[in-house]
Image (spheres, grey):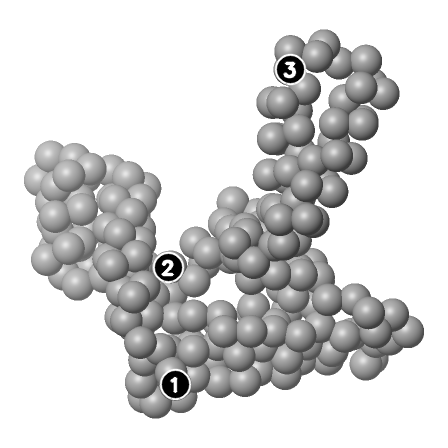
Amino acid sequence: MEITTEMIKQLRAATNAPMLDCRKALQEANGDYAKAVDWLREKGMATAAKRANRDASNGVVEMYSHGGGRVGVMVELNCETDFVARAEQFRTLAHEIALQIAASAPRYITAEEIPAAELEHEAEIARGRAKEEGKPENIHAKIVEGRVEKFKDEVCLMRQAYIRDESLTIEKLILQNVAAIGENVVVRRFQRWELGESTTQN
């Protein structure tokens, strides 16, 4: 199929990818627009992953208050340069992450931060439930593993489904932005407060 300039322009407008990449994506996808978008996203995410070890010490502390002051969030989002830290796309991403934290109440950034004792506690609960539900013993380990993974999806910011698009995790949302911005982006830390909650909570 012939790849026209118009097709390349349309893809570039939608993805912000360089013209040459748009042409290559359309060639790889044989002119299929949706497949070309997927090709660019995958390429962008692969490039973004390579940037993950670059130092990110600039950024912004985003503050967000929700429900008439019932929930408050503070999140530190880092990037590599002051230029990107001031960019609208980066600021918007910081705001979206603060919204996510307010709505979904994650307790950790990544699964690696969850204490082993907490994971073992969840595994114990899952084992107990599997027995209670009368599941065959030979599949208990699989059930426990599945429930522990589900627990990680719920409590880890990076693994949560993005509140505006459940087909994306927060990790993928950040990778898409890294691909577009061209710099490493890191959620350094966050804190979420809810009116009246116990101060012993994480």
* Classed neighbour count for the residue bearing mark 2: other residues with Cα under 10 Å, few (<14), some (14–19), many (≥20): many
Where residue 178 sits, quadrant-wise, is bottom left
Q: Secondary structure at mark 2?
A: helix
Q: Which mark is residue 129?
A: none
| Residue 65 found in image quarter | bottom right
The residue labelled by disc 2 is 176
Rendered view: 70 above or below 125: below
Q: Which residue: 68% across, 19% down?
A: 140
Residue 139, label in figure = 3
Amino acid of disc 1: Asn
* Picture disc at residue 58: 1
Mark positioned earlier in the residue sequence (2 or 3): 3
Left or right of 20: which side holds 189? right
Q: Quadrant of the image for the C terminus?
A: bottom right
Residue type at numbered disc 2: Gln
Judge left or right: residue 160 versus residue 58: right
